[in-house]
Image (tube, rainbow, N blue to C red):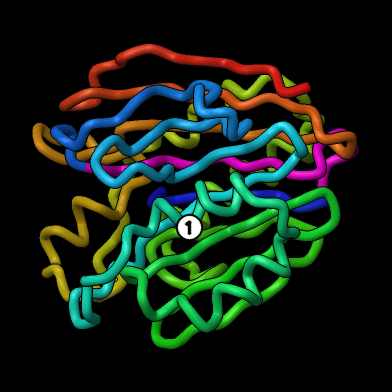
């Protein structure tokens, strides 16, 4: 994932609400959102290159998502980040327990943010500049390619859109959230981060939705999990230059 807004215990129906975009090279092989056929109970898209996922849920009301950390001044080698999400969903550990266990192994992975949620807790952990974790409190939070709640403009705007949807009584009509994920606003230079990629690329990547021939937004996803472990996950898929490739909606029981 590359930009995410999520609400933890801030909605009368949904324990966890999450809206986010996955940006990736279009040539990277990927499967669409589906229940995995390996007996794991995972419902997610799948990275066929490394075998993990960027965002997924299971049948027990748990959710995991991972973003990279965009800082070219940091080492970019290590284990695949996507395995962090799928390994959690395959296992039996709670969110906080899994995050604590990862602290020793976190440096072995490429720079990452990992958000884990179960029925009781929501936990964030990352490994740059060093392994650490936090427990987001009730409310709306944002995550992009920096630390939790870093106010990158596109993340802040997505968080505002999620808050407005909740305040307006949003329940299961997720169209306004997908509209926010489709925002192609490029933000002023003074508001952009310096992640070592140069100003032109910072400008291009400053919007929530990235449109490009070789690289861009591949999936827009909304997750809504209730307090009984059920819910819904919806994924819209995009090809080069933002061409729509379909949408999937799966009910979780």
Q: Considering only vertical position in the picture, is 23 above or below 168?
A: below
Image location of residue 14, percent across then percent down = 81, 37
On-image quarter of the C terminus: top right
Image location of residue 17, percent across then percent down = 69, 41
Residue found farthest to the bottom: 130
Is residue 121 inside the magenta stretch?
no
Number of numbered markers = 1
Mark 1 element type: helix
Q: Considering only vertical position in the picture, is 62 above or below 145?
A: above
Q: Is residue 191 visible?
A: no
Image location of residue 202, percent across then percent down = 21, 61
What secondary structure prevails in the magenta region? Answer: strand
Mark 1 Cα within 10 Å, few/some/many (few <14, many 20+)? Answer: many
Horizontal arrangement in the rendering, residue 4 relative to residue 71 (left or right): right
Query: 48 and 244: which one is in front?
Result: 48
Horizontal arrangement in the rendering, residue 85 relative to residue 197 (left or right): right
What residue did someone put label 1 on?
Answer: 84
Q: Residue at x 10, y 37 (%)?
A: 214
Residue 228 lies in quadrant: top right
Horizontal arrangement in the rendering, residue 132 relative to residue 216 (left or right): right
Q: Residue at x 30, y 54 (%)?
A: 206
Residue 63 lies in quadrant: top right
Horizontal arrangement in the rendering, residue 13 relative to residue 164 (left or right): right
Query: 159 and 29: which one is in front?
Result: 29
Is residue 21 inside the magenta stretch?
yes
Residue found farthest to the front: 39
Q: Which residues are the magenta region?
A: 10-24
Q: Considering only vertical position in the picture, is 87 above or below 235?
A: below
Q: Is residue 208 visible?
A: yes
């Amino acid at each position: 994932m590359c930009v995410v807004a999520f609400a933890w215990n801030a909605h009368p129906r949904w324990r966890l609400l999450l809206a986010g975009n996955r940006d990736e090279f279009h040539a990277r092989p990927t499967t669409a959102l589906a229940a995995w056929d390996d007996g794991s109970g995972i419902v997610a898209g799948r990275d066929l290159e490394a075998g993990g996922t960027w965002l997924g849920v299971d049948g027990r009301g748990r959710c995991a998502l991972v973003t990279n950390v965009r800082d070219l001044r940091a080492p970019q080698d290590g284990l695949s980040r996507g395995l962090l999400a799928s390994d959690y969903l395959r296992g039996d550990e709670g969110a906080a327990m899994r995050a604590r266990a990862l602290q020793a192994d976190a440096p072995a992975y490429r720079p990452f943010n990992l958000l884990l949620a179960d029925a009781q807790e929501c936990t964030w952990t990352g490994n740059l500049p060093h392994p650490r974790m936090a427990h987001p409190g009730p409310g709306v939070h944002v995550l992009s390619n920096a630390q939790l709640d870093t106010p990158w403009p596109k993340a802040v705007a997505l968080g505002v859109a999620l808050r407005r949807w909740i305040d307006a009584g949003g329940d299961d009509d997720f169209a306004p959230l997908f509209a926010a994920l489709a925002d192609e606003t490029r933000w002023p230079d003074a508001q952009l981060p310096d992640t070592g990629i140069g100003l032109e690329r910072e400008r291009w990547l400053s919007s929530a939705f990235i449109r490009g021939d070789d690289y861009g937004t591949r999936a827009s996803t909304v997750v809504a999990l209730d307090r009984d472990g059920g819910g819904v996950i919806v994924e819209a898929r995009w090809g080069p230059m933002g061409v729509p490739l379909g949408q999937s909606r799966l009910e979780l029981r």
